Image (cartoon, rainbow, N blue to C red):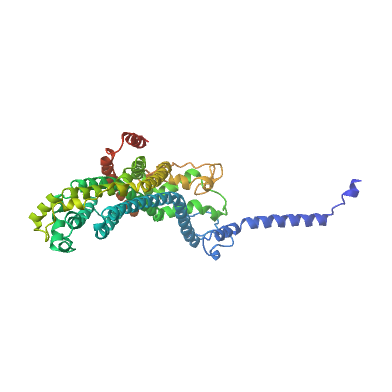
Amino acid sequence: MSRGICPRVNSFDSVRILALVIFAVNAIEADKHTCYEVRAAFQQRYIGPLHLVPEKPYKDADLQICKHQGPSCCTKKMEECYQAAVKRETLQKIESYTYELENMLSSQLDTFQDMFQYLLSFSQGHLSSLLEGTYSSLSRQALPHVNQLFSSLSLYLRGANISVEMTIHKFFNNIFPLVYARLINPGIEGSVTAGSTMGDCLRMIRQDVKPFGNHPVTMAQELAEVLETGRQLSLGLDKGLEVINATEHADLSRDCVKGLAKMVYCSHCRGLTLIKPCVGYCLNVMRGCLASMAELDQPWRTYISSLKKLTLAMAGHHSLELAMLGVRGHVNEALLYAQSHGPLITATVDKVCGLSTREPPVFSWIQNFPSSPVMPIALTVSQTLRGVLRVGIISHCHIEFLGQLQRYKSFFNTLPELLCDGEQTMDDSTCWGGDGVVESYNARIVRNGLHAQRQNPEVKVRSMDPTIAEFKKRLEHFNQLKDLTFFFLYFTLPMSIRLLMLLIHQR
């Protein structure tokens, strides 16, 4: 029965089957010793021209990085392509991790500047409506000075080298001739025209005569104090963007690129295109490559702490909003003061600048005194409330920003770990150790920092990158200036805000 099912195999058939098996085995072995997988990876990763990859492994004595005693699928030209590719890939990975941080700082800078511009525009319109509604006799000539005032304040908030105090005093100097000729002594406008001797004299003596009382000084002090906080916050966010941009365009050293090529691509030379580096091996290579960036860790931590304090100062109370909305009140009080002291101001001006061309009638300043200066202000109460409400919503965004900042406090210290995390490495018995497949990486894993990395077994770390060193100095200088600014700012804040800032500093 069994013979019927299984026919007899003769000796000729046996020889034939054995030959086929030997042929198949030889074909498999021949396929193992080709560079097909290496060619495929070389093409898929856009590393270089495909003709550079040999068809079969052979010994190349010219190899500088991926040296191997046995046959190899790599050539010196391929090593050059591997170095260019791994440098490009590493910089792209660094940029992918810095993108979120850069976007966060950029978005917050835009939010702050939008808020500042909104407050400036709102305050400018507030003041313009006061002049047009209550002091219409001088509004047309005064409005250009109002525009110049807020334009200068806007430039200051964006970092321009402008003095807030001088800007405000210049504003009051410029409107004094208008106030003198149209509110205090109406009818003498002809002698106090732009560029006239009388007009120039009035501008020069304004701070000595004090026709507006102490209101200009008070307004200058209040605005200088709160605008400095906003200015420092804008400059701080911009400084952070500069540092991030510098890291994205940092130049990787030659030794670093060689170490990266050995870690990522030398396994390909042996046909191992799917093997991944050991975690410890990757950390040593990445920490060596980013040794200069790690030096930014401490000044960056200080920078983040300062940024939190300034953001909290902006969001914790509405001093900036109140100061900007108070400009109208200060100017109104200054004009009322000038009108109520008209005779005394006129007498002083006549002594210093000479007699006016026309003697004002007795008590003429009373006739020009605004009968109801409160009404125009009352008409804008709803507008003011809307302005404060909008700024309050923006302040809520600032609080959210504080939480996001905390995640990036140790960014430069943890960047090597980020680059070695996930699917980039393996931590088991089959990982690439640089010279072959190993069960585990046994070399010493060196800590972060330029000094510690001099003992790195994988990458030679010689000196700090000049670009990173320059931005480290800038960041440290910025932190020093910020400490001085915050020292004066701190004691103007409510106690509750001070306590919150102390808690943030301790964290």
* Residue 160: % across, % down: 28, 55
In the image, taking residue 154 as reference, residue 76 lies left or right, namely: right
Figure quadrant of residue 316: top left
Image point (84%, 54%), residue name = 10
Residue 454 screen position, x and y as percent: 37, 46
Residue 500: x and y in percent read 35, 35
Q: 238 left or right of 13?
A: left
Q: Residue at x 46, y 59 (%)?
A: 84
How many badges with numbers are in the image?
A: 0
Q: Residue drawn 9% across and 58% down? A: 355
Toward the viewer: 382 or 393? 382
Q: Nearer the viewer, residue 136 or 317?
A: 136
Identify whether 246 is placed above or below 1: below
The quarter of the image holding the C terminus is: top left
Q: Where's residue 449, x and y in %? A: 37, 44
| Viewer-closest of 243 and 455 | 243
In the displayed structure image, the side of residue 174 where residue 77 appears, left or right: right
